[in-house]
Amino acid sequence: MTVTDQQSVHATEPNEEGYRGFTIGHFNLRRDEYFVYIDWPTGSHTMSVDAFLRAIQRDVAWDFFYGTVNFDGVFGTVNHYGTVDIFAGRYNESYRKAELDYTENVETPLIRETFKAILDDWTSSGFDPFASPHETGSAFGIKHGDNTRAVTRTRVAAARMVGVPGDAPLRSDEDGYPVNRMFADVPQDEPEVYAEPGFENEVAAFSLFAYLSRSDVTWNPSVASVCKESLFCPTTEEYILPIIHGNDRVEWFIQLSDEITWEVEDRETGAVRARVVMKPGDVSAMPADIRHQGYSPKRSMLLVWENNSADLPDLIASGKTPTYPIDF
Ligand code: PHB
Ligand code: FE
């Protein structure tokens, strides 16, 4: 954080529950023991604090992600890759009709530092917004300590491939990544690689299942391999994706284990479009004009395949590229 960034975060003194209030643009945000209260010039909104913290944790860790991050049906952010829209009711048909919706565009560093400050101030010790609800403590109550170590985690991002010398390392017991309770049956042996002499740094393989079985976070895709603009982002999922993601590009899902149900809605209005139940081996492509939220009753493994090209949002918004991936 630079000094300039720090100065631009507008925070109040702590309230009687011990939490600061924050202002960004014309949005004011505050919390008490149970709720987050957001107001803007044309309206106001309330969220449960646990859902809010799980959502803002992803927005911060993914640096506003691809496209839209809806915290719920009212509040969220749209990434313009350099600036970010912060909105209320913008993607909610009823708010739009009643003209209660409001959007403000802010420089990315300002919202990044403000959201980081909110997340850190509002997370007490014992609550980890990245953990499954069954594996962490409560988000509620008056402020007690902090969990800065947990909330400043960023996603693991390989530049080439996990396990290649010099790149993101494999996880192990020794590094503090035990096999998750729900993946106790996942084999832990690694492939044997016999590289031609001179190619030891180029040829590598690893067990993706073993790697994922040791993930300590949920709904937080890592970047496990990079090939030009193709990013393989595997992740472990349990309970509910804490955001409703509005795509600005097509995104592929490969269900590696267990089951996830996706609720798919129209990105602009929130109208229901589909329910997709994905079982192991199922592959789906999510169109570029929807938003979606996943439900995972057991911890599951999901491969999210992203096209990272910076050209895609404009190509799709201008109609030069379709919102769906393939014509059969
Ligand atoms: C998504 O929005 O596509 C998404 C986000 C996080 C995950 C999985 C999928 O863990
Ligand atoms: Fe998505």
Image (tube, rainbow, N blue to C red):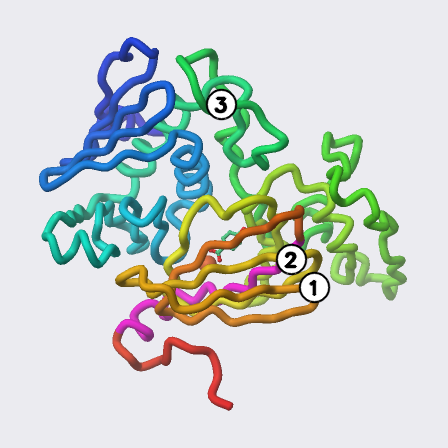
Residue type beneath disc 3: Thr
Residue 174 in percent (x, y) is at 79, 30
Residue extent of the magenta highlight: 301-317
Which residue in the protein does label 1 denote?
A: 280
314 part of magenta stretch: yes
Count residues near mark 3 (Cα–Cα under 10 Å), then give few for <14, some for 14-19, many for 20+. Answer: some
**324 is higher (above) or lower (below) than 24:** below
Residue 259 circle label: 2
Residue found 52% across the figure and 46% down from its top: 240
Residue found 62% across the figure and 60% down from its top: 303
Quick check: marks 1 and 2 in contact, CB under 8 Å? yes
Residue 148 circle label: 3
Residue 294 visible to the viewer: yes
Q: Nearer the viewer, residue 314 or 287?
A: 287
Image side of residue 202 versus residue 197, left or right: left
Residue type beneath disc 1: Pro
